[in-house]
Image: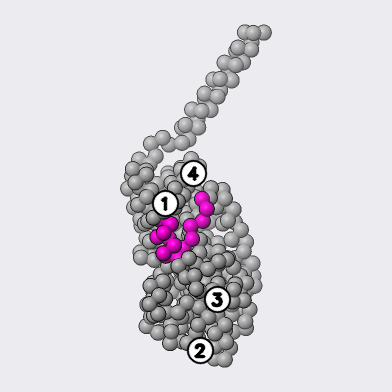
Amino acid sequence: MKRNTLSRRSLIGTALLGLAGVAAAQTPGNWPDRPIRYVVAGPAGGGMDVFTRMIADKVQSSLKQPVVVENKPGANGMIGNGAVAKAAGDGHTFLFTASSSIAINPLMVAKMPYDTEKELVPVTQMGTGGIVLVANPATGLKNLRDLVQFAKTHPGKLSYGSWGNGSTGHLVMEGIKKENGVFITHIPYKSTASEIVDLLSGSLDVAFTDVASPLPHIRSGKLVALGATGAARGPGLPDVPTLAEQGYKFDAEGWFGVFAPGGTPPAIVQRMNEEINKALATEDLRQRFTAQNLTIPPARSAAEFASIVKADIQRWQGLAKVIHLTPQ
């Protein structure tokens, strides 16, 4: 009996050692063994690009490997998203993108070039914040009420910009139009930078932009902030009321998030999650994010971020039904 017991113990011990060996094999001990690529689904100089480069500086110092930031703007993030979705899941490529490109693109595009849910793995959420509704001062608009009233008394005269069909700016404004029974012409742009150029010149009346790009122009008085989405006022624009405060109750929280290609080892996803969360927790980064009107959320696991992504998809699907959005 004793001999049999010992034999069983030996077998169990051997099996456990074998499992440990398998786990070790699944977790690349030499990762990263070459430069890491951060793909930004937005233009150089935009809000998301600025935030990504802040994080890249911290992460490359910690991992002892260069982190190269590569911008792939266009098609409401689909170009950058697609590049990462089709990249090798070897832990050396990551995507930095906005919530709209993840939650809304599948609602807008009938034949997506990639499967968002299967080919992009949530890593972490790096910042939250609404989008900002801004206007050229010459319009005389000061808030959402002014916008709606002007659109009612001057039907068809106003035009608004967003950074593309299917962007959060596009859908939120369409929701505002639907709720108030007004018509405002939509002009899609390739980037928020292009919108701001036309806003400043006066060739565009109003636009939804990201939370960071218009800040210097709002502070200098060259642009007027009419409101912002989100559950709370932005830290960089504390005097600008949310759209919810002004009566428009759709309060989806926009975010910038990090994703990995499908097939990326879970251990690497977890490690990058930890590295980015660690970078976001530093005081200098928090101050710089606040200055750019973005809030850093509490550190979240990849699973927690995945739950947020799922909930946002359902929320935007609800708005899409209200405004009768159909895939193109």
Q: Percent from the top left, x then y, of residue 95?
A: 44, 55
For numbered disc 4, what is the local secondary structure?
A: helix
Foreground mark, 4 or 2? 4
For numbered disc 1, what is the local secondary structure?
A: loop
Residue pointed to by mark 3: 173
- Label 4, label 2: how far apart the Cα atoms are: 51 Å
The earlier-in-sequence mark between 3 and 2 is 2
The earlier-in-sequence mark between 4 and 3 is 3
The earlier-in-sequence mark between 1 and 4 is 4
Q: What's the magenta region? A: 285-299
Reply above or below: 277 against 45.
above
Q: Is residue 291 magenta?
A: yes
Q: Percent from the top left, x then y, of residue 213?
A: 41, 69
Q: Percent from the top left, x then y, of residue 29?
A: 41, 35
> Which residue extends farthest bottom?
153
Q: Does residue 33 appear to the left or right of 271 in the view shown?
A: left
Q: Does residue 113 appear to the left or right of 180 in the view shown?
A: left
- Label 4, label 3: how far apart the Cα atoms are: 37 Å
Reply above or below: 21 against 258.
above
Residue count near mark 2 (Cα–Cα under 10 Å), binned few <14, some 14–19, many ≥20: few
Q: Does residue 222 appear to the left or right of 325 in the view shown?
A: left
Look at the image and tell me whether residue 321 can be seen: yes
